[in-house]
Amino acid sequence: MDTSMVPSETPSLQAAAPEAAAPETTPGTDAVGSAAIVIAPPARRRRRFAVLYLLLGLFVVFGSFAGWYLITRKPITALPLPAITQQPMPKYLFSVYGPTKPTGIAVTSDGSRIYVTDPGGSGGLMIFDGQGRKVADVSVPDSFPGDHVMVYVATDPATGDIYVSDRPAGAIWIFSGDGAFRREFEPDQQLNGWQPLGIAFGPDGNLYVTDLSGPYHRVEVVTKDGKLVRTIGERGQMNFPNGVAVDATGRVFVTDSNDGRLLVFGQDGRRVGLIARGQKQGELGLPRGIAIDDQGLVYVVDMTAHQVQVYAQMATDESTPRFLGHVGKEGSDDGDFLFPNGVAVDARARIYVTDQVNDRVQVWSY
Amino acid sequence: MRRMAILATGVAVWLFLFAIPVFADGGPHIATANNGSTTLTSDNCAGCHRAHTATVTDILRTEVPALCIVCHGRVGLGATTNVEDGIQYTTQTIGQPSRSHTENGDGTTGTELGALRAGGFRKARIDSSNPGRISYPRYSSGAWVASFTSNVPVLASSADVTSRHMNLDSLASKKAWGNGAIGSGAGDTIQLNCTSCHNPHGNGNYRILNPVPEADEGLEGEGFAITNSSGVVVKDALPAATTLAASTDLGGNTRNYTVMQNSSGTGAVAYQGEPATGGLNTLLTVKNVVDGGYSATDGDYFRRYVPWYRSAIYSGGVWTGTYVGLSGANSSVKGGRSDSPTGVTYSGNLYAATGSTPAISDSFSNELTAWCAQCHSRYHTGLFPSAGTTSSSFATSQLNELTGEDVFKFRHGTLNNGCQVCHVAHGSNAQMLGDNSKAETMPDGSAAPMGSTDSRLLKVDNRGTCQQCHDPTGTVPAGFSGANGSTGTSTTTYYGPGTPNFPTP
């Protein structure tokens, strides 16, 4: 008899003996009556119930957990996900008004003095204190006739003197940190007729000067007493280079302005790095001023992008400075730029930018 | 495996197609080869344009003229032309002796090659108070007469302009005086920008000028002819293509000249001999010129003496000559008034006219005038008279009444006296302080844009441009050399027959 076809009886009615009991007959019937109900052995029944209880229990547990999660879940950002470290960008601090169409800027290491050229105004230079209050106007003495328009400025870290390039005069003038005229910078005879534009001091104490005279634009490296040390750049390599800066390792960074790119030269004068012109992040349009802070971060003013691009310190095996971010956008509000031109940094990680068409200097800080 | 390979390939292709970076490079507009015609590449477009995110019309990323001034501004950070102050910076090779400012006459050194002929939009360096006038003997109608030539020196330092073609700080609409059909009033209102006149992409034209000036709005195109009361066409309809195209590329000799003439310096002086008697027939060279000896390809610009003077001579029913001060046999210039050339033949000219075919359409001076007349159309008195016109009617045709016109009824001749003889293109610092010269109103009766002392882009103080060429008194002797109103010098200025400086055959 196929006991599977026999409905099982309730457990209390099932026989307890493990062996299948012989079918029982009902009293008064024949020895073999109609088909009897087959009851599963007790052990199997217990297993089935056990599984059932287990499943029910799991359902309760997981269901409760799901309900809890749905009710209490948070955005994923709240979770401490492993993050890629991003270089923070400086924030706008304040503006300094006074110069007209300022182009060049330099600042003392402690930020106590800000030097800004004023080509759209007097053609001279303005000196501000660290809070942006003007302390002096500087100009070339009348004993030097002709047109004078100061363009770019650099501070001598050794003496505090300021060196200013004068476009029409084709000269560099030296003033004290307080603005007292010292002298004209007199280079070697072989640099007669040069057209100095961008200027910067290197860690070697030499002056690095972008030169627009013929036969081709380049960078001259000269000592402070005017001796030519070397020339950087080849024929056709640069087109109106405006800015120059030198990092701690002696690499020379030049904004090749009209070619829309940043060139990096090694100590031997070979080009070792390049930021090309383009529309991708970090690429340039019309780079002008450039500065390098004490952490090696490179700041390049991209005039037609109305921004300052920030790049990481270049490793020795890198050929392209890594782009970190940018500062500012086009406009006239605080923190916006209109045709910015020059940039300088101080030891407090403050960045100073000549916001040319907005007639101001903007100060940013981390 | 095969399916996997196909799938992998499809993924790779997809990644390739959608991951190519956009190579729209940045940078300023092309700046090699004279901002000129041969080096345009797509590499440079994104310096000024953005295809989808531009903030300024013409899909520019930032506005003009500020965009132009970042290079062509006061400090010349990206170019050798400073159109704010009207200065040309030099591209002199290092190691050479520092330049002296011979144009300024003060001997200072520096990077300034000289003054832009067009002046600047904020300042200019036109020595408008010290124009030079030189008279020279010219044989005319059987007699020696005095004829004049002129030069305007360079100021030692830039001075504020008293008139300008455009205000860099405010591109407000203004009148294009003389624009429009005959009888249409003083002129139409237009708005100018740098790109109205210049092509920032570069072309082969002088000063990268557009073939036809294009105002931002409101300019009525030129295209009509002007006929005088005698039925003679005094100004042909100028087709839109009338321009400064290749014909102005005169072997590089005049294409990029920049610097204003000087009043000092040296130069050979000859005279115009009398051809009927087998005279020298030597062309005149104006004395006070400076030729720095720069070659045509020396840097962005070079200096050569190029006068403003007339070019074609129409005499005896024949066009006989055109020259614009080129080197070689015709490096001289002929100056003076344009209304009395008679029976003189000049040979070896670059653009020699032949018979009844005028060559003046190729003349630099007339080309420039035609260009200006695209906007100032009713100022133009004639491109070329009809063939067969005699010299007398030729002269008359320039001054004839413009029939049907109320404002610009009679005008100074412009044929062979180009606009640039008297005017500059960007701005002038000339002073109009004289009682008769100041307080002039504009053709519509309105006040001048820069006040009573507005100089109308003229080069000489107090309308002195007239005296540069004209002597209505008839008393100025041949051989006079000096500033207007001065007595001139004595021993070295007379060049007529019998004088010490009269060259012998």
Image (cartoon, rainbow, N blue to C red):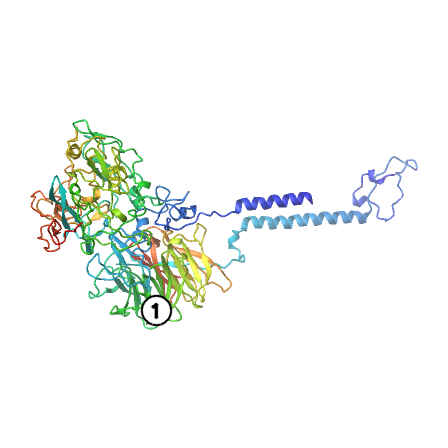
Residue A63, image x, y percentages: 62, 48
Residue A79, image x, y percentages: 53, 55
* A47 left or right of B318 in image: right
Q: Compared with residue A8, is residue A321 higher up or lower down, i.e. above or below?
A: below
- Of residues B229 and A52, which is closer to you in this image? B229
User: Which residue is rendered at x = 34% and y = 44% of the image?
Assistant: B204
- Of residues B99 and B326, which is closer to you in this image? B326
Q: Is residue B452 visible?
A: no
Mark 1: which secondary structure?
A: loop
- Of residues A66 and B211, which is closer to you in this image? B211
User: Which residue is rendered at x = 46% and y = 60% of the image?
Assistant: A273
User: Which residue is rendered at x = 51% and y = 47% of the image?
Assistant: B20
Residue annotated with mark 1: A110
**Kind of residue indicated by mark 1:** Asp
Q: Compared with residue B179, is residue B89 higher up or lower down, i.e. above or below?
A: below
Q: Chain of mark 1?
A: A
Residue B492, image x, y percentages: 13, 55
In which image quadrant can residue B165 be found?
Answer: top left
Q: Residue furthest right?
A: A31
Q: Residues within 10 Å of mark 1 (few under 14, many from 20)?
A: few
Residue B169, image x, y percentages: 25, 48
Q: Compared with residue B2, is residue A166 higher up or lower down, i.e. above or below?
A: below
- Of residues A172 and B499, which is closer to you in this image? B499
Placement of the N terminus of chain A among the 4 image quadrants: top right
